[in-house]
Amino acid sequence: MRIHELARPEVFTLSPYIPGKPADEVKRQLGLERVIKLASNENPLGPSPRAVKCIQDLASSVHIYPDASAFRLKTALRERYDIDADQIILGNGSDEIIMLLGQTFIRPGDEAIMPHPSFPVYRTSVLLMGGRPVEVPLKDGFLDIEAMVSRVTEKTKMFFVCNPNNPTGAMVDRSRIQYLMDNIPDHVLVVADEAYAEYVEDPDYGDMLRYLKEGRNVAVLHTFSKIYGLAGLRVGYGLVPADVAAAFNRVRLSFNTNAIGQAAACAALEDLDHVEKSRKLNAQGMRYLSARFTEMGLKVYPSWGNFILVDTGRDCQKVFEGLIRKGVIVRPTTPWGLDTCLRITVGTPEENEVLVEALEATLEELA
Ligand SMILES: Cc1ncc(COP(=O)(O)O)c(C=O)c1O
């Protein structure tokens, strides 16, 4: 018997996650001096200087285990959101929180409703536990909340709302969230993944915190990987009912967030100027890229995040490879079944210009 045959059958239903190509890998492979990575929705400004200082200060203390209860970070989040500390959960990125929620809630045969295409970890977290992902197609890039709600059954355990949605960037507005909360039964945990919420400036954004505070079964997930610029430190958090947190904390490993990550997250949370600067830069870059892509005759999906989905009208793998040769890494959306689109992170003004030039040249080569 080959040893892999002993693995749980659910493992073979999973597709490996394909992350954005690291810039160093492309530099090495192509011998390029400068490579721009606009593939993983990171903050092009980098982390807050306050977070950097805090990371440097802590370097000599890494022989000490982290605080398993993350007291300082939970205190800061409690004050930010005005909720109880026992309603806050933490993870090694919000990725891990999604996986742990699956492990906590999904039994074989349970269903979880999710948009498609969307963040692939929802599917993985459910499949791995023997559950059934019920994937509901988007409508022109937007979540079809009515169609998703219509798929709820007795077996539904979780309902994922990705807001704004990765990879399309679409937001779910207040009225759709209200419709969802008016119609979702109590036996379902609504997981609102708001990884990009800090970028949204639209007053119509349907955030979920209000429903959590009203005592509904809602988990609101955020991350320090996006606007806070700490993707490499892996810290995500969730705001959840206290009994969900109690169950979750039995499943997680004690030290699932590291000491430097916890401290840097506190510093990043306090640096409101850096967050504001990042938001402004993103809004400006988003306007620039949307305008330039539209001028190039490409279909642009309206985005409320820090990335933009653009339909190149051609095989996106070829466009992706053409851009790589020019030192620009973006994300082809073939794994999502969007064979002609690219998901492009908004960079600095200079990076955006380099990208636009490289894209124009690539499309010309492929014409
Ligand atoms: C919608 C969404 N949720 C969650 C995550 C996970 O972020 P992290 O695990 O870095 O916190 C991402 C990352 O790209 C994302 O796009």
Image (cartoon, rainbow, N blue to C red):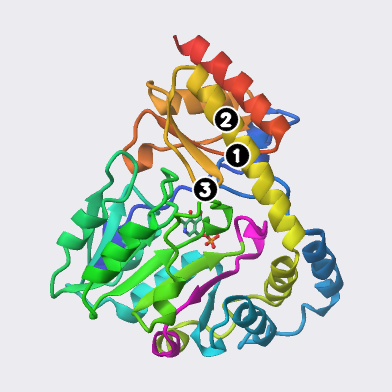
Q: Is residue 303 above or below residue 230?
A: above
Q: Amino acid at mark 2?
A: Leu
Is 82 or 262 nearer to us in this picture? 82
Residue 105 visible in the snapshot: yes
- Residue tagged 3: 305
* Helix, strand or loop under label 1: loop
Q: How many angstroms separate mark 2 from mark 3 (CA)?
A: 13 Å
Q: Position of residue 320 (x, y in %)?
A: 50, 28
Q: Looking at the rendering, which quadrant does residue 151 occupy?
A: bottom left
Q: Is residue 360 above or below residue 355?
A: above
Q: Position of residue 94 (x, y in %)?
A: 50, 66
Q: Position of residue 322 (x, y in %)?
A: 53, 22
Residue at 63% x, 19% y is 357
Residue 2 visible in the snapshot: no
- Residue tagged 2: 289
* Helix, strand or loop under label 2: helix
Label 2 with label 1: CB-CB less than 8 Å: yes
- The crowd level at tag 1 (other Cα within 10 Å; few <14, some 14-19, many 20+) is many
Point out the image quarter for the C terminus. top left
Q: Amino acid at mark 3?
A: Gly
- The crowd level at tag 3 (other Cα within 10 Å; few <14, some 14-19, many 20+) is many
**Magenta residues, as a range?**
225-246
Earlier in the chain: of badge 2 and badge 1, it is 2
- Residue tagged 1: 346
Check residue 245 for magenta coloring.
yes
